[in-house]
Image (tube, rainbow, N blue to C red):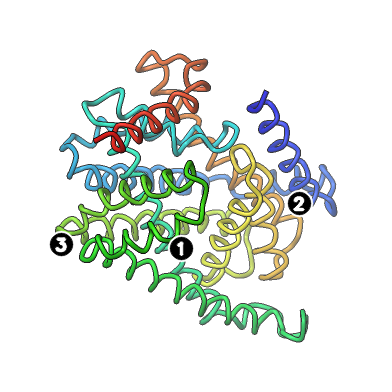
């Protein structure tokens, strides 16, 4: 029942986001924009999206090195099937990937989950750096006329960019303290969790312990360089994959700044407005970036959003379904993985407490 409620809520939010995206355009206009686009540019866009997942696999391989050395080819199955979890309620991808990896290889669920946490951290740092650039150094793209509580949108963008820079520094300092002064940091964590219910306190402390284990990989300078380079390449692909579509729809602003604004708005919307497969929220982010900020045609922006989401979803679904059939997985078992993954998580947490 809980899953059904989450699915219904997610689909409702997706429909609201789609309504926001499509409210001012007709279906015939969108279909016309599809017909008029230059379809040849879809090929490089798809190839760049696929290349981004190749870089993700190599980064995951490096992140897993402290626990197990494995061939990168063995990671594509749990990675692509795991990313299909974005189409399940409550974004089960974070549980699905480590669960599938722990079943495929002799690695604990906790160690696999720690690698996902580190992956998310590096993605967050890269995204924050993009935020800093867009909101601080590209603030002129935002309106200086519209004001909210006495501040213009442009001024708020600059302030937000500065906050993102502080957040990036804070994350880096936290990792340094966790690696170099862990006992002192854990005392501070114990003091903070003392004000929380025991269940939440235990989970937070366990997550930090697992995060610390995942952080061990960055002690090796060579591994840190590899992870940083792969993370940068992942986000380059995330952004550049849209560039062929700029030519496909013949947009006015074919610039790097426009690409960065686009990726920022998509990231904000899919985080703030969670939906299955990011349907609706992904499209709304593209509409806001291209039409509201960059001043592109609303019809082209809507068509661009539909095609962009289809490329993102198509690569994940095609890759995930291929490995599901290749590895003879059960779709029903994948839907039930979330509970099994949480059970493994709790079991290993209790084992750590017992030890």
Comparing marks 1 and 2, which lies closer to the viewer? Answer: 1
Image-based side of 4 in relation to 62, left or right = right
Q: Of label 2 and label 3, which has the lower sequence position?
A: 2
- Element class at badge 2: helix
Picture quadrant where residue 126 is located: bottom left
- Element class at badge 3: helix
Give the Cα distance between marks 2 and 3: 45 Å
Please provide percent x and percent y for residue 159. 58, 81
Q: Of label 1 and label 2, which has the lower sequence position?
A: 2
Question: Label 3 belongs to which residue?
Answer: 221
Give the Cα distance between marks 1 and 2: 24 Å
Assess disc 1: are there few (<14), some (14-19) or many (≥20) residues with their C-alpha within 10 Å of its C-alpha: many
Whether residue 347 is situated above or below residue 68 in the rendered picture: above
Image-based side of 77 in relation to 167, left or right = left
Image-based side of 84 in relation to 107, left or right = right
The residue drawn where x is 35% and y is 51% is: 208
Please provide percent x and percent y for residue 102. 30, 28
Comparing marks 2 and 3, which lies closer to the viewer? Answer: 3
The residue drawn where x is 53% and y is 35% is: 314
Please provide percent x and percent y for residue 333. 47, 17
Q: Which mark is residue 127?
A: 1
The answer to whether any part of residue 342 appears in the image is: yes
Whether residue 6 is situated above or below residue 178 in the rendered picture: above
């Amino acid at each position: 029942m809980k899953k059904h409620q989450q699915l219904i809520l997610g689909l409702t939010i997706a429909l609201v986001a789609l309504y926001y995206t499509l409210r001012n355009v007709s279906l015939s206009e969108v279909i016309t924009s599809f017909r008029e686009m230059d379809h040849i540019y879809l090929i490089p866009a798809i190839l760049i999206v696929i290349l981004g997942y190749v870089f993700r696999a190599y980064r995951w391989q490096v992140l897993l090195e402290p626990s197990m050395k494995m061939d990168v080819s063995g990671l594509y199955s749990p990675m692509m099937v795991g990313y299909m979890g974005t189409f399940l309620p409550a974004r089960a991808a974070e549980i699905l990937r480590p669960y599938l990896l722990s079943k495929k290889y002799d690695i604990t669920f906790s160690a696999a989950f720690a690698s996902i946490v580190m992956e998310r951290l590096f993605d967050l740092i890269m995204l924050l750096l993009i935020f800093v650039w867009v909101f601080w150094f590209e603030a002129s793209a935002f309106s200086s006329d519209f004001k909210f509580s006495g501040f213009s949108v442009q001024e708020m963008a600059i302030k937000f960019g500065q906050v993102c820079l502080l957040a990036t520094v804070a994350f880096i300092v936290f990792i340094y303290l966790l690696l170099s002064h862990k006992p002192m940091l854990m005392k501070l964590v114990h003091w903070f969790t003392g004000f929380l219910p025991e269940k939440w306190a235990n989970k937070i402390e366990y997550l930090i312990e697992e995060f610390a284990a995942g952080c061990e990989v960055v002690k090796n300078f060579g591994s840190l360089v590899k992870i940083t380079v792969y993370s940068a390449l992942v986000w380059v692909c995330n952004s550049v994959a849209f560039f062929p579509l700029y030519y496909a729809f013949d947009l006015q602003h074919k610039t790097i700044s426009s690409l960065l604004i686009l990726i920022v708005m998509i990231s904000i919307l899919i985080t703030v407005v969670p939906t299955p497969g990011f349907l609706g929220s992904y499209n709304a982010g593209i509409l806001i970036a291209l039409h509201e900020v960059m001043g592109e045609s609303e019809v082209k922006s809507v068509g661009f959003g539909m095609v962009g989401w289809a490329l993102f979803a198509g690569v994940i679904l095609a890759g995930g379904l291929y490995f599901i059939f290749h590895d003879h997985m059960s779709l029903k078992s994948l839907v039930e993985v979330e509970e099994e993954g949480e059970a493994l998580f709790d079991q290993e947490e209790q084992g750590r407490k017992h030890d």
